[in-house]
Image (cartoon, helix red, strand yellow):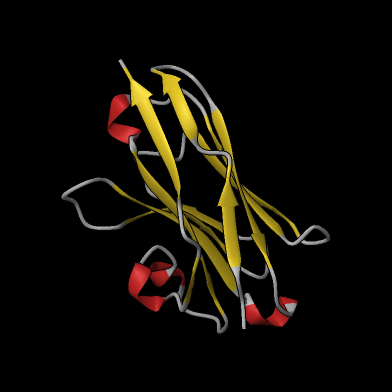
Amino acid sequence: QVQLVESGGGSVQAGGSLRLSCVGSGAPESKNCMAWFRQAPGKEREGVAAIDNDGRTSYVDSMKRRFTISEDTIKNTLYLQMHDLQPEDTAMYYCAARSRPIGWSLLLSPIYYNYWGQGTQVTVSS
């Protein structure tokens, strides 16, 4: 069983930065792929960035210049560094993990992840 706990959200002004963290429990092999997703009120959950067991990363094009996903396997922690935040980035941000490999093109699809955290709120004011 995998448990994921996010932290690091908060309220910032446009142009600000935040770093989200996600601490994961469970055996390392139970977290083959990990990713960040976000969901704004009234919208579907969308992918932000993902990283697989080989360290390959995948980003949504609109965020790749401002967001960076990374992981510290010793600390069992996944990070999302976010720069130049804008009001449209306001959402609940979720950490997710998948225990089996999937195709590269599917890394940012939420339906393929079987473990989820409770989320951390990011609010960006103009």
Q: Is residue 62 above or below residue 32?
A: above
Q: Nearer the viewer, residue 118 or 84?
A: 118
Task: Tally the numbered discs.
Answer: 0
Q: Is residue 125 left or right of residue 71?
A: left
Q: Quadrant of the N terminus?
A: bottom right
Q: Position of residue 12 (x, y in %)?
A: 45, 22
Q: Position of residue 25 (x, y in %)?
A: 69, 71
Picture quadrant where residue 63 is located: top left
Q: Nearer the viewer, residue 125 or 53?
A: 125
Q: Position of residue 75 (x, y in %)?
A: 80, 57
Furthest residue toward left: 42
Q: Is residue 3 above or below residue 85?
A: below
Residue at figure coordinates x 56%, y 53% from the top left: 6
Q: Quadrant of the C terminus?
A: top left
Residue at figure coordinates x 74%, y 80% from the top left: 27
Q: Is residue 117 above or below residue 6?
A: below
Furthest residue toward right: 74
Residue at figure coordinates x 55%, y 81% from the top left: 101
Residue at figure coordinates x 66%, y 70% from the top left: 53
Q: Position of residue 88 (x, y in %)?
A: 28, 32
